[in-house]
Image (cartoon, rainbow, N blue to C red):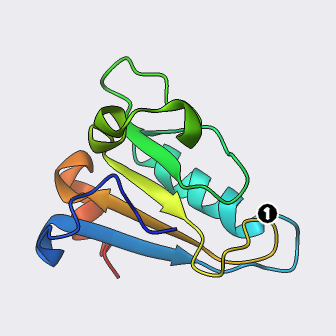
Amino acid sequence: MGIMTLPPDAPADQIVERTFGNTGELFSAFYAAQQWAENRGLIVGQMQARAPIGLHRESEAYNVLKWRGMTAWERRGLDGCIVWPDGDPRNGSAKIRVRRDALPEAVLEEGAGS
């Protein structure tokens, strides 16, 4: 599944991407992605099989629902999401795509886009 929360034509310089590999433990890539996002002030939504997981800035009171529970309008309002490049959240890698303006400046300086 592609990321539907960020405009498909969004310039690359407005998006931060980070990929996390699986270490052999179940859901290890997801847990690493979740920790990375939470350490940078993002709320991580609820997992729903292979669907994307929404990310939203913690500074705004917001409950990030499961993907199927959100309307298209709510999905567009997210600051990013976690997707599964391999299609397997249990044993595969996890990729975060998040709006650059949703991250603290210090994160951008540490090379979060690499």
Residue wearing tag 1: 27
Camera-side residue of 20 and 73: 73
Secondary structure, mark 1, is loop
Q: Is residue 23 above or below residue 112?
A: below
The image quarter containing residue 92 is: bottom right
Relative to 97, is 67 on the left or the right? right
Camera-side residue of 5 and 113: 5
Q: Amino acid at mark 1?
A: Phe
**Mark 1 neighbour class, 10 Å CA radius: few under 14, some 14 to 19, many 20 or more:** some
Pinpoint residue 32: horizontal percent, then vertical percent.
64, 62
Residue at screen point 27% across, 37% down: 77
Q: Quadrant of the C terminus?
A: bottom left
Residue at screen point 46% across, 33% down: 70
Please tell me how many numbered marks the rendered image carries.
Answer: 1
Residue at screen point 54% across, 42% down: 67
Toward the right, the furthest residue is: 25
Pinpoint residue 18: horizontal percent, then vertical percent.
44, 73
The image quarter containing residue 41 is: top left
Relative to 70, is 34 on the left or the right? right
Camera-side residue of 19 and 111: 19
Residue at screen point 57% across, 79% down: 85
Pinpoint residue 42: horizontal percent, then vertical percent.
42, 41
Q: Is residue 36 above or below residue 68?
A: below
Relative to 92, is 59 on the left or the right? left
